[in-house]
Image: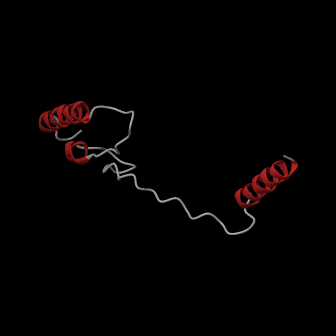
Amino acid sequence: MWLFAILVVLALGGVALVAAGHGEPLAPAYDDRPDVGVPPTGPLGAEHLRSARFGMVLRGYRMAEVDALLERLATQLEGADETNPAG
């Protein structure tokens, strides 16, 4: 029983050392999220909304609903651009 307890403590200590940065470092995390497709700054246009893509998640939004809203907003922006080309 004592031997098992000592082994558990030593294993947890080893994990703590690695997590604290001692020993071989962990590999950097790979960011596999897709680019949203819109510029981070500046005005957005209809073409930006049409090209926007979001990452897939287990608990998120329905893709068809998001696509429908983005299409509606893009059409609305195009209409606004046609009626007010200066603004």
Decide: is 18 above or below 84.
below
Question: Residue sitting at 55 percent across and 63 percent down?
Answer: 28
Q: Is residue 75 left or right of residue 43?
A: left
- The quarter in which the C terminus is drawn is top left
Question: In the displayed image of the protein, which residue is found farthest to the right?
Answer: 2
Question: Residue sitting at 83 percent across and 48 percent down?
Answer: 5
The x, y position of residue 23, in whole percent, is 73, 68
The x, y position of residue 78, in whole percent, is 15, 38
Q: How is the image coloured?
A: secondary structure
Q: Nearer the viewer, residue 1 or 62?
A: 1
Question: In the displayed image of the protein, which residue is found farthest to the bottom?
Answer: 24
Question: Residue sitting at 57 percent across and 65 percent down?
Answer: 27
Q: Nearer the viewer, residue 57 or 6?
A: 6
Decide: is 18 above or below 65.
below
Q: Nearer the viewer, residue 21 or 73?
A: 21
The x, y position of residue 63, in whole percent, is 25, 36
Quadrant assignment, res 68: top left
Decide: is 24 above or below 77.
below
Quadrant assignment, res 57: top left
Q: Nearer the viewer, residue 27 or 31?
A: 27
Q: Is residue 51 left or right of residue 24?
A: left
Decide: is 31 above or below 45.
below
Q: How many marks?
A: 0
The x, y position of residue 52, in whole percent, is 27, 46
Question: In the displayed image of the protein, which residue is found farthest to the front?
Answer: 1
Q: Is residue 47 left or right of residue 32?
A: left
